Amino acid sequence: MSELTLTVLRFSLLILLWLFVFSLAAVLRGDLFGTRVVNRVSASGGGRPAPTPRDRRTPALDNLVVTSGPLAGTRIPLGSTDILIGRNPGCHLVLDDDFSSGQHARIFPAANGWGVEDLGSTNGTFVNGQRIDEAVQFEPGSQVRVGRTTIELQK
Amino acid sequence: MSIVTSWRPRRGRNVELLLLIFAVAIVVLAYVSVEGATHGTIPANLATMAGGLLSIAVAFHLVLRFTASYADPLLLPIATLLNGLGLVMIHRLDIAEGRSITGGMALRQLTWSALAVGIAIACLLWLRDHRTLRKYTFLAGASGVALLLLPLLPFVGREVNGARIWIGIGPFTFQPGEIAKIALAVFFAGYLVRTRDVLSIAGPKFLGMQLPRGRDLGPILVMWLLSLAVLFFQKDLGSALLFFGLFVAMLYVATERIGWITIGLLLAGGGAVIAWMLFGHVQTRVLLWLHTWTPEALAASDQLAKGLMGMAAGGLFGTGLGRGRPDITYFAESDFIVSSFGEELGMTGLFAILMLYILLVERGLRIAIGVRDGFGKLLAAGLAFSVALQVFVVVGGVTRVIPLTGLTMPFLSSGGSSLLANWTLVALLLRISDQARQPLTDMAATGPIPTVGARR
């Protein structure tokens, strides 16, 4: 092989390596634009963060909004599936709250709107201050309390 | 730990396939340059080699398509490119040393690569949800420590070049410390997710920094003593640094307290001074690091000096693959593969390789941010950090930033155990990223979450 060919090979290798790096960076761009960062330090004095699900842009009919507690401000669009609430990392809304059980409560699609049900938690689930022992209707505007967390349905 | 989610979750499998083809094309070009420079011809087996590499990569890609379709699209192309570049450099050193293609190290490395990818695929197929690993927290911890101590046993343990970090059964040798890295990361993640509430309780305040309570120092001291034991009995500076650093970093991620990093750095500094005062081999390393060019140091070992001269000869754009003399340095294909690349690809090429590692680590940390459970967060952050620390220790050692220690460069260095461990690490990150990038509705549909009534 001639000296010229080798030099061309040598520089094209370097150029391709960097092109590869830049194409990876181009794919990464999605991390910077079109994402939403929610800082977990809440107004109630910076409770230690825990993983929670965040909202997705799905064709949401209703939103589940946390109105008080360490996760205040969290918003979960409701789809057609159940939402589990509790301390278990497998839950959709993972609470970092000693007053809630592993799987505490379930929000599920009911005949007309949404229902809420306690899953046998230790400290109970409260709808508008009333402890529930069976599945009840979750009306928009009513407040469901699980441990130190209050959630509401909002449009 | 904030949660970051994308508006539109994209699977990115097609992007991944394109990048894979790009990565294989770069490896093929590198192979052609080596053969062109050394033998003056285009290699006859080019189509076979390129086809082989591409089919391994595409097989992994197809497995991802079917079992982890939301997995991160960048990890696999980066790992493939690094592994391929390592193969080309090892083949190039084979040629320089006059080893034939069948008896050379490149073929062995290729076999190990295929085996490692196979094991990574098996790992992905077996592990459908990374949270399963949490059940094996203490098993992972015990096997991690056992793997670390295995080389100390008589009969199976082997001492190679002063470090007792190998086991050998018949002709097969293995470095169990590499696998121990993953086992310990699993253990730390499972352990810290349980204890982080206690470990983050504020203790005394010092210079405006919140320190942890004295009674919570137990775990970090145990890890420190274990690292010192690795250093003392196995004479392995790199592994000791890696394990202790991994624990401190994961402790910080779990508790968000800078105090732990300060304590970790102080302990590591103290341990380094103790090791320097007590052990002759550490004193030699420090001498080589600080006074590389003195006659005493050159008499002890001129490896580091030769590596530096090689990189200096490479300059900005390198000598070109196959046209330098990286084979002059001992262990040019393992510990010093970074200076081999520095010589033949120059600073421009070496920085591109370092960028690939940065992106690999960035993806790992990004996965940790996106995943929804605490265990997954800690595991992903720990695995990513272990790669970062390992690259820092190797490159820092070769470029005289820190004393030289015997760790392998992930994916590049010759060595089966290292390849095996790092491909498994990538498989774990891919599995976690699949969970992190999956939309909630899909998760409910595929059903990792039990519904009504199922109590823990």
Image (cartoon, coloured by chain):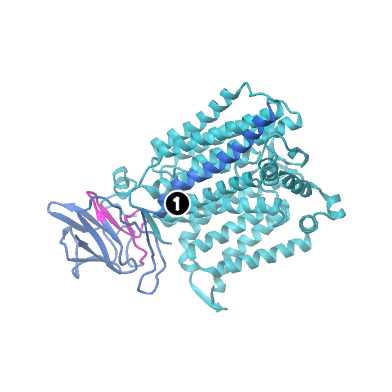
Chain colours: A blue, B cyan
Q: Residue furthest top?
A: B44
Q: Is residue B122 visible?
A: yes
Residue name at image x 50 percent, y 58 percent: B191
Dominant secondary-structure state across the stretch colored magenta? loop
> Element type at marker 1?
helix
Quarter of the view holding residue A6: top right
Residue name at image x 75 percent, y 38 percent: B325
Q: Which is nearer the eye, A94 or B289?
A: B289
Q: With respect to residue B285, does A6 lie above or below? A: above
Q: Residue furthest front?
A: A4
Q: Bounds of the magenta span?
A: A77-97
Judge left or right: residue B291 versus residue B136.
Answer: right
Magenta segment: does it hold B104?
no
Q: Which is nearer the eye, B389 or B173?
A: B389
Q: Position of residue B248 (x, y in %)?
A: 57, 61
Q: Which is nearer the eye, B294 or B106?
A: B294
Magenta segment: does it hold A95?
yes
Q: Which is nearer the eye, A131 or A17?
A: A17
Q: Position of residue B42 (x, y in %)?
A: 63, 24
Q: Position of residue B104 (x, y in %)?
A: 70, 29
Q: Position of residue B425 (x, y in %)?
A: 53, 45
Q: Is residue B132 visible?
A: no
Q: With respect to residue B414, does A88 lie above or below? A: below
Residue name at image x 17 percent, y 65 percent: A141
In the picture, which quadrant includes the C terminus of chain A? Answer: bottom left
Q: Could you tell me the amino acid type at mark 1? A: Ile
In the picture, which quadrant includes the N terminus of chain A? Answer: top right
Quarter of the view holding residue B418: top right
The residue beneath circle 1 is: B367
